[in-house]
Image (cartoon, rainbow, N blue to C red):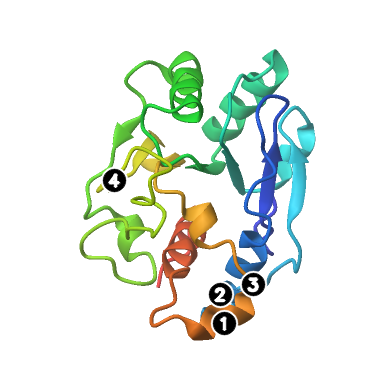
Amino acid sequence: MRRAKFTFARLKYNSGDWDTDQRMPSNLLNSLLEYTTIPLDEEEKIVELSSRDLFKYPFCYLSGHKLVQFSQQEAVNFKTYVHNGGFVFVDDCNHDIDGLFARSFETQMGNLFGPKALKKIPNNHGIYNAFFKFDKGPPTTSFELNGWGDDLVHDYLKAITINNRIGVLYSNKDYGCEWDYDFRNKRFLAEDNTKFGVNIILYAMGINS
């Protein structure tokens, strides 16, 4: 896998709607440029989950609202990628623990890694201190109580851990929509809400502050 330069790789899977929150990757790339010195590819890369190209990238993003039903090759690639040290950040755009995306994705993870592999991570996990400090665990999003999802603030994230490192980070908090705005509008925020995204990426890349 390439580690010299960070590429924001988005996974394209055959079921569901994979092409969500289209401005978010540019926003996070801008944050990495602003806060860190790691070399970057300037544009998001779309990667077919069924393709061997997946294994070029140590970080991938997967999101959607609808059904997640991997094909046989997608399932094989996903499992192999994670076991080989890859990191997948998965974000439920429905922010709903009982919605279609959540139920179908969690079923896929159970099939691939075992029914108890996806577990809540503690709010003092290293990912919350990888660069910026989040002493209370995952930051909330403005989308969690907007009436679209389950009307709950999710005070935890889940993960599949391989060899004491997160291989799949799973969120019902809809960070993708939270960060889906033109990065030039960040100046209007009282606090930059993309900072946790920086933590996720640096943790995935094995880079700590």
Q: Amino acid at mark 3?
A: Asp
Q: Quadrant of residue 11?
A: top right
Instruction: Give the spatial CA distance, label 4 vs label 3.
Output: 26 Å
Disc with the residue nearer the chain's start (2 vs 4)? 2
Residue that mark 4 sits on: 154
Instruction: Give the spatial CA distance, label 2 vs label 4.
Output: 24 Å
Q: Amino acid at mark 2?
A: Ser
Residue that mark 2 sits on: 31
* Helix, strand or loop at mark 3: loop
Q: Position of residue 12 (x, y in %)?
A: 72, 36
Disc with the residue nearer the chain's start (4 vs 1)? 1
Q: Nearer the viewer, residue 171 or 53?
A: 171
Mark 3 neighbour density, 10 Å: few (under 14) some (14–19) many (20 or more): some
Residue drawn at 67 percent across, 38 percent down: 18
Residue that mark 1 sits on: 34
Mark 4 neighbour density, 10 Å: few (under 14) some (14–19) many (20 or more): some
Q: Which quadrant would the C terminus be assigned to in this image?
A: bottom left
